[in-house]
Image: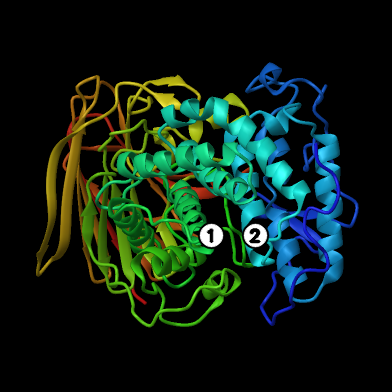
Amino acid sequence: MPQGDFFIVDKWQSENLSAPIHWHKSGRIFSHHPFSVSDVPPDWHANPFTGERIVQPERDWWLIPDFDPAIGDIKLIWELSRFDWVLAFVQRARTGDRQSLIRLNNWLNDWCHKNPSYKGPNWKCGQEASIRVMHLAMAALILNQTKTTSVALIDLVELHLQRIAPTIRYAMAQDNNHGTSEAAAMFIGGSWLEKFGRPRGVKWAATGRKWLENRAKRLIGNDGSFSQYSLNYHRVMLDTFSMVEVWRRQLLLPKFSERLQQRVQAAAYWQYAITNRWNGDGPNIGANDGARLLQLTDTDYRDFRPSVQLASVLFAGARAYIDEGVWDHPLSWLGLATPSDLIPEPKSQVFDRGGFALLCDGDAKAVLRYPSFRFRPSQADALHTDLWLQGRNLLRDAGTYSYNTKERWLNYFPGTESHNTIQFDDRDQMPRLSRFLFGDWLKTSVFKSLSRTSDGQTVTAGYKDGYNVRHTRTVNLSSGLLKVTDEVSDFKERAILRWRLEPGDWEITNGLLTKGSHTIFVFCDVPIKRYELVEGWESRFYHEKQSVPVLEVEVNQSGTLITEYRWSV
């Protein structure tokens, strides 16, 4: 492992930029949980929440199991070794804080000493190695050291590519962000090595470019939908391509294909449309494991605006947000001009490649999730419906919580019970085959695309599952009203409609659920057996959960349920 000054202390020019405060006295695990830091490096093999250390970290990476009970959630070990702190340290260095660069070199030397090549958990995953490469490259770019890179840093990058290259086809087989991340690291790291005369860099850069083109074509639809059906993983993918394009421009490398640029541009618009402009938050749909790349601001983890703005500028040549704000800071740090053009305002539309219907009415926005699976679904969330009013998530999804926890939570968060849909006979909509895989994927059997009338905007989708149970949902959004009509049939014992609510003092009076100016009424053409508020759970941030009120409406025979959610501002 290399040692020495990875970043050259006396070769940078201070600039008047706004440096983040995170990773100065306190870092953020999964971009959310506080973690005290100092000049003393952290323990790279310890759970940052409990201090419990991994056993035998000197083992070869391939001898360490994926889900070792003694380790718990290995993401807790990996998190500090993603090198998010590298970016924060170099940002403060650019504003004149010389001590931050000294601390950075000390931490990197300690990491190399404690994580010898291909030994221990932090070498286990090619994607984790790739994230380190991307962050080191962006740090060198911010410090203007891409052309005056130290030998130690180039050596460290080369060691990482040697780890990524042998298993890259495994990453591609996942059809998710593993492939985009590892292709990006190969392209960025390989072209960097090539500039410094490292012979393998040429081949690795070409491999990375090939797979980036391949992944953009295969995983991103023409409408911008991404293979993982997840807002947060969509951001991971978007930030990855943004770093690739920034690097390509920095090294004056040939452009990517027009198709790649168009696909990523569409993906940026998808993220822009689904999230809200008031606070940058969006539906907690799909897997959400706390991943967040390219953290150049102090914005909240759930604020997607910095990523949307950066990708829009890079791939559309236009801004997403007209007002100046912290979401513009990445442009300054990466030396990008701010264009005057704006991308189009979000409008009601269907993203059929991913199975998302978006309905917009003034300050209100509804999202219907329907089964259009070209890639493996990670959650049984068919016909889930999210409702937003400005920055408020009125009807919400549960998130993920943890990939390695008690069986109850492993079943709950990805399962049908944690979504705003209907659960039949106490089972999930699809059978669970493993931790990350459902079988017998649902297919949309009924679909009526967006229509606009004097009564608002309407979309309909439905499915028939493996037990021949049928569920069709029609969502209508108009001024101050969300109306959802559910037709259900052919289940055996019970169907439970759930609405996961914004926390607050909800009360049921004569069948009407109220909280201030917000009211919910559910009526049905068959008898309602149960109508009550229960406790549910949500995870807005990885490894954190909190209770939320959930309205459950149970029927025991085929019928039609109509939900009306009304509000006034």
Give residue 336's position: percent from left, percent from top: 51, 73
Q: On residue 251, which mark appears?
A: 1
Q: Give the camera-side residue of 37 and 18.
A: 18
Q: Please name the residue shown 69% across and 62% down the image.
A: 145
Q: For numbered disc 1, what is the local secondary structure?
A: loop
Residue at the outermost right position: 40
Q: CA distance from mark 2 to mark 1?
A: 8 Å
**Mark 2 Cα shell of 10 Å, populated few (<14), some (14-19), many (≥20):** some
Give residue 567's position: percent from left, percent from top: 33, 69
Residue 22, visible in the rendered structure: no
**Mark 1 Cα shell of 10 Å, populated few (<14), some (14-19), many (≥20):** some
Amino acid at the residue labelled 2: Thr
The residue singled out by tag 2 in the image is 146
Question: Are circles 2 and 1 on residues that touch, CB within 8 Å?
Answer: yes
Give residue 212's position: percent from left, percent from top: 41, 44
Above or below: residue 19 compared with residue 431: below
